[in-house]
Image (tube, grey):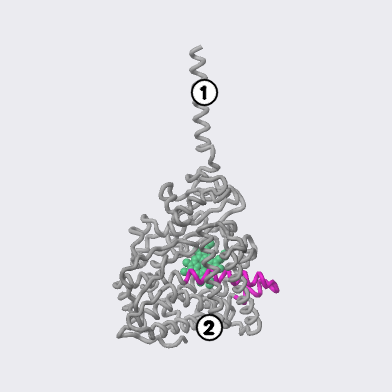
Amino acid sequence: MLDFVIFAVTVIVVLIIAVIYMYPSSKKISTIPGLDKTSAEDGNLMDIQRAGSLHEFLQNLHEQHGPIVSFWIGDEFVVSIASPALFKQHLSVFDRPGDLYRIVTPVFGVNSILFLNGAEGRARRQLFDKSLHHENLDYYAEHLHKVSMDLVSKWSSLVKEEHIGLQEYMAAFATKAVLQCIMGSYFTDDKEVLAFKRNFDQVWSELEHRARDPEIPSAETPRGHQFETALKELRAVMTRALEHRKKHKLGRKEELTVDHIMAAHHNDKDAMVGDCLTYICSGIPQTASMLTWCLYFLASHPKVQDKLHTELLHEFKVSGEFHPSTVLRLKYLRQVLEESLRCAVVMPWTARYQDFDTEIGGHKIPKFTAVVHALGVVMQDETLFPVPNKFDPDRFNVENSKNRDTLAFPPFGFAGKRHCPARDWVYLATSTIVASLINRFQVSLVEGQVVTPVYGMVTQPQDEVWVTVHKRARRLVPSTVA
Ligand code: HEM
């Protein structure tokens, strides 16, 4: 009898161990470490809100559980990956899980390139990519040079020691530069730029609000009403810009993004406006943020600023001209821009999914699972970038970069040839304005400020960043663009 009891108990224990081994947690649908739902309805949304942002939530989660983690957004099981090795396993994935981006749908529309997957998505990307490609940079250089010179002359006319709000000036530059390069000459008229900006600022700040607090206000509430009104106005400005472009389209040399958008959507005006707004909303806040952070870092690191100024003096003395081939050749300037993108984590994440079951890092990923690419977590990983919060452009010199995996620095995304289509343009635009300003002005931080990043869809300083500028004694005047 005793033998039978011992046998029976042993069998039961073995069975329990087998069940525990095969199903590590009865609540988990995967072997990926991470969080169970905190609330049946919202999943971990409250945890994300408590962390401050998705980026900060992911930083904590990856620190606790390693480079692959899981959590819940509402009823949706979500995976996040954060290492060059895991990124490599997603190199060819193109499709994007629209659900994670639903807050932008009212602005971009359901037909936006942002949501388009499969063969159709790839084909539209190929078409649109033609316009911002590096071969066309010479064309944009002329416009960017002019917009930069407008800002230089504004700063030249400021009273000595006047405090300058970096966010305000960089947003104004980014708005003009993006509108003119994406939409064309309609936005050489400052009145139209202002009409656009007034409404755009309201729409964007509401989207950032919704990214932090997903409760969407109804159109009857003051906030909801303000958003709807601004969005309607914004669409009206874009429609006028499209009509203007149709009438005044110039020769083939000037194939802008707007021209490809018009060709792709034939007579579907809503879809045209949606794709134009996708490009513009994906471009202005990001470029403004990158520039604000870059000039803030230069103002708070005078030695880096001096070194950059020395490079500018030397290069312009040698080449004597201001041209993409010159400004993009400046190695230290590029290091400063890359370190600004890394340190500030301008766009902290993107995402993909696949319509079949797959595997990452040895874990099964059920089909349609959203996989977040935690770009910001990787760019702040201290094993890849020691003392990650320190601004140090020398991290990006040839010697220090040579053994680093290129996927350790993916500020524009990396997967499925769907990385940011404007990457080359961004380096041209930011190189042009930063070189123009630092060539003429010494930028200094107004003392006593605490500059705190807010990680939303785009990372911005919480409050305006104040600087003063002093005209430099020795400067070279770049010649006009060839
Ligand atoms: C500092 C500036 C910028 C940064 C850091 C940045 C970063 C990114 C990132 C991370 C993505 C997601 C890529 C992916 O899913 O793999 C993206 C997509 C995109 N970006 Fe940018 N971007 C910047 C500027 C711009 C500008 C200036 C434009 C246009 C004028 C632009 C247009 C777009 C568009 C349209 C997409 C979506 C493409 C698609 O869905 O296929 N971006 N960007």
Give the magenta-colored segment's residue range: 258-287
Of residues 404 and 275, which is closer to you in this image?
Answer: 275
Pointer 1 local density, CA inside 10 Å: few below 14, some 14–19, many at least 20: few
SS at circle 2: helix
Query: At label 2, which amino acid type do we have?
Result: Asp
Identify residue for label 1. Answer: 11
Q: Position of residue 393 (x, y in %)?
A: 35, 68
Q: Position of residue 322 (x, y in %)?
A: 42, 83
Q: Main secondary structure of the magenta part?
A: helix
- Label 1 to label 2: alpha-carbon separation: 81 Å
Q: Of the two numbered discs 1 and 2 on the same chain, state the one appearing first in sequence.
A: 1
- What residue is drawn where x is 51% and y is 72%? 284
In the drawing, what numbered circle is on residue 378?
A: none
Asked if residue 419 lies in the magenta stretch, the reply is no
- What residue is drawn where x is 35% and y is 75%? 467
Q: Position of 219 compared to 335: left or right?
A: right
Query: At label 1, which amino acid type do we have?
Result: Val
Where on the picture, by quarter, is residue 148? bottom left
Q: Is mark 1 within 8 Å of ligand 1?
A: no
SS at circle 1: helix
Q: Is mark 2 within 8 Å of ligand 1?
A: no
Identify residue for label 2. Answer: 190
Q: Position of residue 56 (x, y in %)?
A: 44, 55
- What residue is drawn where x is 51% and y is 31%? 18
Pointer 2 local density, CA inside 10 Å: few below 14, some 14–19, many at least 20: few
Q: Position of 308 compared to 168: left or right?
A: left
Are circles 1 and 2 on residues that touch, CB within 8 Å?
no
Is residue 172 visible from the viewing direction of this image?
A: yes
Q: Point out the residue furthest to the top here.
A: 1
